[in-house]
Structures are given as structure tokens and as C-alpha cells.
Amino acid sequence: MTSLAVGFWSAREFGSVAVWLSNGIMAAALLQLHRREAIGVLLACFAANLLNNVFRGDPGIFLWLNAVLNMGVAVITAVLARRFCGAALDMRRPHRLIRFTLLAALPAVVASAAVALGVMHALNPMTPTLLLFFIQTYVSVEFLGVMLITPPLLMFARAYRFRGMSRASPREAAMLIAFSLAVTLLTFWQTSAPLQFLTMMPLLLIALRLSPPTTAGAVLATAILAGALTLTGHGPVHLTRLSTDPALAGAPEMMQRLFILNLFLTCIVITALPISTVVTERRRLESRLRARTLAAQDARRRAEHAAEARGRFLALMSHEMRTPLNGVAGFADLLAARPGLDPEAVRQARQIRRSSDGLLMLVEDILDFARGDATLSPEPVALAEVVDDALKPSLDALEAKGLSLRIETLLAPGARHMADRRVLRQALHALISNAVKFTDRGGVEITVRERGDRIALRVADTGRGLDPAERDRLFQAFEQADVTLCRAHEGAGMGLALASRNVARMGGTIEVEGGEGRGAAFTLVLPLARAADAARTEPVAETVPDSGRAPRVLVVDDHPVNREVARVMLEAFGCEVAEAVDGVEAVAAVDAEAFDLILMDVRMPRMDGLDATRAVRAAGARTPIVAMTADAMPEDVARCLASGMDAHMAKPISQAGLLRVLTQALTAEGDAASRAA
């Protein structure tokens, strides 16, 4: 009602309207209110518009046409805004404000102008110049009215969306708005200089510092103040020299001047509001980026903590599983070596040892699979030895089935290659185990050869072969060809998945051959660099070198079973054995007497093996220290060597391995004594 009254007063007093705000108010009501309330507002506005036209004295058809066209502008604008600006009508987005301007407000105003001026021209023909002038004036008045009212009202209705978007404090915001209004008042009060461009600068500052609703309010206040002063004869608009074209003689002078004002205000609207939305959108994206960055950093910290926890868990599980296996395997070896034991008991003891080795290998595979793609630790290895290690757990099954075994190593004698022994052994073991498992007649053939600059390790069998339907899931974790309760073959379904991952880590590939009923062949093709060939050495003695006295060995371990296993094995070699239950006792024992070898556990109470080794080395003792521990990860080996230990021996230990370590320690000690002499 207020906007209609202002328009009525402006038309009666000055023969023109600066800005027609009613259509923008109706469009905002249609977009913001519920349907019943919006229809009520439209009917009320339509009635008020008719009443205004009656008081204004519009003749004939224009009494109704003006009200219908105003309602048409509001309805078309609202419908197009819903269609192109989304149901949320979120004017924070610059692209939605642009769509509202170009695809909703402007088409509605142009359509209304075409109808209104078409009727006017039909009833009272005008010259092209005068018709074009009225079109420009009509479009500018109506378009500016919609743009000044509808977006700000939508922003005010959703002001909660703009919380935190302003960079200015309330005090600064009030000062900026007051400054903008003061500049507008000073600019449009005077009529001595065309300084209307000065109003743009404080509005741009507001657009950069404040939120879009505040910017829209400042633009609207500027438009009202500038329009009122211009209608009353003030401001730089009156300094503009009007055209003397006789064709415009029928147009009121004030209407011609208001067209200039409307163009100026339109420039302000299409500049300040988009800039404000662009700046606000940037602030919103920056805020979202900061939030996502903090979330990503938090997720990274949680992932790192989870990885550390997983690493600690796997290391602990490896240690805890190897400790009882050390007792099983050690006592099985001792039992099998006992003189006068029944041959069947010997066989059973050795079977216990092989079963414990198989269990150990399974435990290692599970832990390595859960551990993920750890760093490789390449070292010079003889591939034939790796094949033998990978084959051992499957020998019993091979013999029980009566299968033949053929191993062909087509490499130069003494050739060695750089490879991670543990990773390569795991991959080969999975292929050999599967070959034995799925072969009932015939045999298994293992071939090692060079293929160009790569090494090919082929495991072939004469078993059931491969079903083409199974090939796609052969290398998936925990997948098996037969998962029924009555399946003939055991297994966790993890071997080929681990083999595939290990081969990929080494930069190689797995080739698969064979069909159903024709056996299968898996070939590892690996880029293993050639290392220095192994020197020819004499076979390792099966007895301890005779030094004229019994070797003295210190066994340091907190677990009594582990100490007993090591002590019995060493005493079988003629050694004198002393025991310590932790690092503190070990350091005290070394200070008290000399030893030829120290077998040091790592995880112990009071003082662990690493700190004990450092203390022994700091005291000047050069006694060979070998880690005899269940910590068998590559990083564990590196940690032991870095602390000052001479070698690493993973549990479960064997008599052969213990003899080798003892022999090397005594030989090294003898060589050092000879050099000193």
C-alpha cells in the first residue's frame, strides 16, 4: 500500500514515477509466502492497484490493464524464479542472482512492456523515437523496482543463512551505512556538479565488508534517497542536458530525467549486489575449506594413530605367537635328537617340528597380510635357498600323497640376486602349497631361470587345473574354489592374495596357465638385480670349534621355557650356560665374568635387550651379542643391529641355527685373537 501511495503521489505531482516497487513486493510475497497467503496478498494488491488507478483517473482499458500487467510481472517473475533459481531461492549464490536477473525479472518486465506499449501504440500511434523512449523508461522503472525489492526481501527472510558472512563488526557496519547515506545525501542535494559516481564507492566498500542483505538494504536506501531528491529538483541528474529532438516533445521533462536516474540506479544494483554475493560465496568456500582441512588433518591424525596402534598390535602378536612356538619347536628338536628314542617317536617329534614350522609360516603370512605394503628389505640371496625354504612346509603333504618333485635351477653356480627373502619366500610358498594341495596324482615341478633381464620362477603341477570361472577371483583375499563344509582342501584362502601383493611390491607379475583337468602353472616374473656371486666356502662344521675349553654362553630371556630350550641345546654342544631374566641381570653378569656369546631377548621387564646391549657396549665389552627374539619384523632386525648387536635370530630357534650362530661367534673371536697376537 505504501509503494502504491508513493507511486500515486509521484505521478500526480511530477507526471512520472521514479521506481515502481509494488511488483517487486508482490513477487517476493509469491516466492516467500504459502499459497493461500500469497493469493490473499495478490488480491489485496490488485484491488489497491485498481483503486489507485481510479483515483489517478486512468481512462478506459488502462484502468484494468495497468493492474493486470503489474500482477503479471509479479507472477511471471515468481514462476521463472522457481524454475531457474531453485526451490531454496538462495541468493547467496552469484549464479542464482544472475539467473534471477536475466531469466526471471528481465523477461517478465519485457513481456509486460510489450503488451502495455503495444496497446498504447494501437490506441494512440507514436513515432518510433517516442515509442523507443517509452519502452526504455517503462522497462527501467519496472526492472529496477523488481531488482531493488525482490532479492533483498528474499535475503531478509533467510537472514540466518548469512550469519558470520560479514567481516565488519556491528559498529563498523553502522558507520559504513551512515557514511554511504551521507555521501548520497551530499551528492544528490547539490546541483552544481555531476558527482553521482561518488555514491558508488561507499556501496562497493559495503559490498566487500558486509553481508548481501545489508548491501541490498544500503542499495535500496540509496535509491529511495536519490529518487526523492531528484523528484524534488535536487541532484546531479538535473544537470544533464536533455535532447531537443521534437519527437520527444510529448514526453514529460521529469520522465526524461528520471530515465537517466534509473539507468544510474540500475548500474548500482547490477554492480553492488553481485559483488557482495561473490565475496560472500568466497568467504563461505574459504570457511568450508578451512573446516574440511581441519577435518582432513584430524582424520590423518586418527589414521596415523590407528596405523601406529596396528603396528604395535602386530608386533605384539608376532612376539606372543612366536614365544610358545619356540617352546614347541625347541623341545620337538630336543626330543627328536634324544639317543635311543624309538624311530616312530623320532618321526612324530619331527612331525611336530614341521607342523610348528607350518603354523609359524601361517602366522607370519597372516601378520604380513594385515600389516600391509611395508617397505622391502632387499639383500643378496641365493634363489635356490629361497625355494628350499618355501618348499619345506609342504614336504610332508608331498610325501603323504606320493607326488614327485622336480626342482630345476637354471642359473649360474653361486649366483645371487637382490631380493627381500621373506617376501619372496611367502609368494613362492603360496604357489607351492596350492600346487601340492590340488594335486592328487603326478607331481610338482619348480623351475628357476633367467628371462631377459628378469627372473622367472615357475611352479607347475598335474592337478585338477583351473576353472575359467575361478580365474577372476584367484587372487582375492579369503576366496576359495570350494567353500562347502565337505570340501576336500583346507586353507584360509589368503595365500594367492598375499603372493599377488608381494609380487606387485617387488615390481613383478604373475602369469597363470592351465585349464580344467590339465594342471596349472604359476610363474613369478620379477626384476631382481644381480648381486655379487657367493664365494666358495667350506661346509659349516656340525660341531663347535675346539678352543681347548668349553664355550661360555649367556642366555638372557624373561621366559623360563625359552631359557631352558636354549640351555639344553647349548649344553648338547658342550657349552657352559649362564642365565639372566632381564637386561639388568645381563649387564651385571657381563661385568662379573667373560662370555664367548650372549643370546639376548628384546622384550624384557626392568631393562629390555636393546638398552642392555647399549650398556654392555658402553662398558667396552666386545662380546658377540645375538638377538634371540620373537620380534622378527624387518624393522625389528634393523633396531637390534642399530643398538650394537651383531646378528639377529628369530624365534622359534633350531639346533642347526643355534650351532651356526655359535660357530660364527667363536670363529670371529678366534680371528680377532689371532690378529691381536
Image: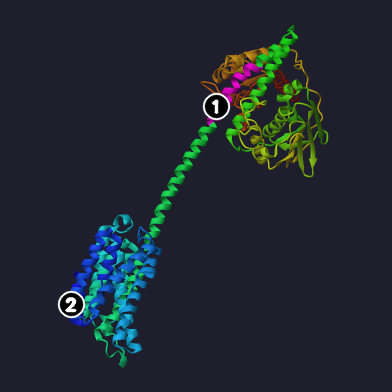
Q: Which residues are magenta?
A: 312-329
**Residue type, label 1:** Leu
Q: Residue 286: x and y, percent? A: 41, 55
Q: Residue 439 location in percent, x, y?
A: 74, 28
Please tell me whether mark 1 sits on a helix, a strand or a loop. Answer: helix
- Residues at discs 2 and 1 in contact (Cβ within 8 Å): no
> Which residue is at 34% across, 79% downward?
114
- What's the amino acid at mark 2? Val
The answer to whether residue 99 is magenta is: no
Residue carrying label 1: 316
Please check the rendered image and state whether residue 313 is part of the magenta-colored stretch, yes or no: yes
Q: How far apart, in angstroms, are the residues tagged by discs 2 and 1?
A: 94 Å
Q: Vertically, is 465 above or below 31?
A: above
Q: Position of residue 657 (x, y in %)?
A: 70, 21
Q: Residues within 10 Å of mark 2 (few under 14, many from 20)?
A: few
Position of 217 relative to 530 (above/below): below
Q: Quadrant of residue 626?
A: top right
Q: Which corner quadrant of the image does residue 594 belong to?
A: top right
32 relative to 652, above or below? below
Q: Quadrant of the C terminus?
A: top right
Q: Nearer the viewer, mark 2 or mark 1?
A: 2
Per the rendering, the mark at residue 54 is: 2
How would you rate the neighbour count of disc 1 (Cα within 10 Å): few for under 14, some for 14-19, many for 20 or more? some
Q: Residue 104: in sight, yes or no?
A: yes
Viewer can see residue 382:
no
Question: Height in image: 1 above or below 620?
Answer: below
Q: Residue at x 75, y 10 (%)?
A: 343
Number of marks present in the image shown: 2
Residue at screen point 19% across, 69% down: 1
Question: Element type at marker 2?
Answer: helix
Judge from the rendering whether residue 604 lies leftward or rightward of residue 192; answer left or right. Answer: right
Across and down, in percent, residue 324 comes to 59, 18
